[in-house]
Amino acid sequence: MSNVLRQQIEEYVSLTDEEFALVLSHFTPKKLKKHQIIIREGEYVHNDYFILSGLMKVCHIDSEGKEHIIQFGMEHCWITDPQAYHNETTATLQVDCLEDCDTLFITLHNREKLCRELQKMDHFFRKQTTANYIAMQRRILCLISSSVKEQYEHLLANYPGLVQRVPKSLIASFLGVSRETLSRLASA
């Protein structure tokens, strides 16, 4: 399964077998269970997770206890609370597993060490982080400038197969609409 990580890295930089072995030595495999919370608001964030299999969500719980889903993480995605991870502060987001997940995670210390040892990985992480920023910008622009129907179509395009894997209530939370509104969209 670690070949999936290698394929993603090699979209940006080529690696020899020895270099990939070095990369893997900085990651830790971790199996996670459905409903397991891996990042809690208010706790320090030590890991960035690469999802080999499974599905996670990133959300914010507001002061009234309402959940706002910010991101879904499917296979081949990276997931963490980026602000807390990179600044070594407490989380403002929560990340939990919607399915059993196989992951590889890297601590910030190991990431920085790896980038010092193998310059190619610094380039990869910069490209990967930039891609995540661009995706988040697209999501924000979609939220503020698109109709709910367009947002739903954007979700379908960016998360293929998601609607078959999660309850409609989670899709509605991601879109910021009621479940009833989502049902009307899905049947239209």
Image (tube, helix red, strand yellow):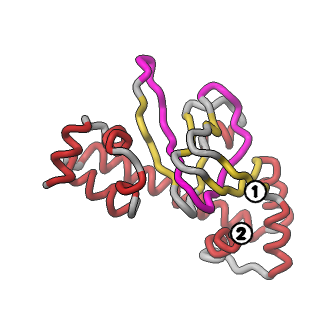
Give the quarter of the image for residue 68: top left
User: Under tag 1, what secondary structure?
Assistant: strand
In this rendering, would 186 be left or right of 176?
A: left
Mark 1 → mark 2, Cα distance in angstroms = 9 Å
User: Would residue 24 be found to the left or right of residue 180 on screen?
Assistant: right
Residue 8 versus residue 180 in the image, above or below: below
* Residue that label 1 marks: 29
The residue positioned 85% from the left and 68% from the top of the image is 22
**Numbered label tally:** 2
Check disc 1 and give the amino acid type.
Pro
What residue is rendered at 63% in x and 45% in y?
Answer: 33
The front one of 173 and 137 is 173
Residue 5: say if magenta.
Answer: no
Decide which of 96, 35 is in the foreground and name it: 35
Q: What x and y, as percent, mark residue 111?
A: 77, 54
Tell me the magenta residue range.
41-65
- For marks 1 and 2, the one nearer the N-term is 2
Find the residue positioned furthest to the top. 64
Q: Is residue 131 left or right of residue 51?
A: left
CA neighbours of label 1 inside 10 A, class few (<14), some (14 to 19), many (20+) = some
Residue name at image x 68 percent, y 69 percent: 1
Residue 56 image position (x, y, % from top left): 53, 48
- The residue singled out by tag 2 in the image is 2
Q: Are marks 1 and 2 in contact (CB under 8 Å)?
A: no
Q: Residue at x 85, y 63 (%)?
A: 25
User: How far from the left and from the top, in percent, is residue 119?
Assistant: 78, 68
Q: Secondary structure at mark 2?
A: helix
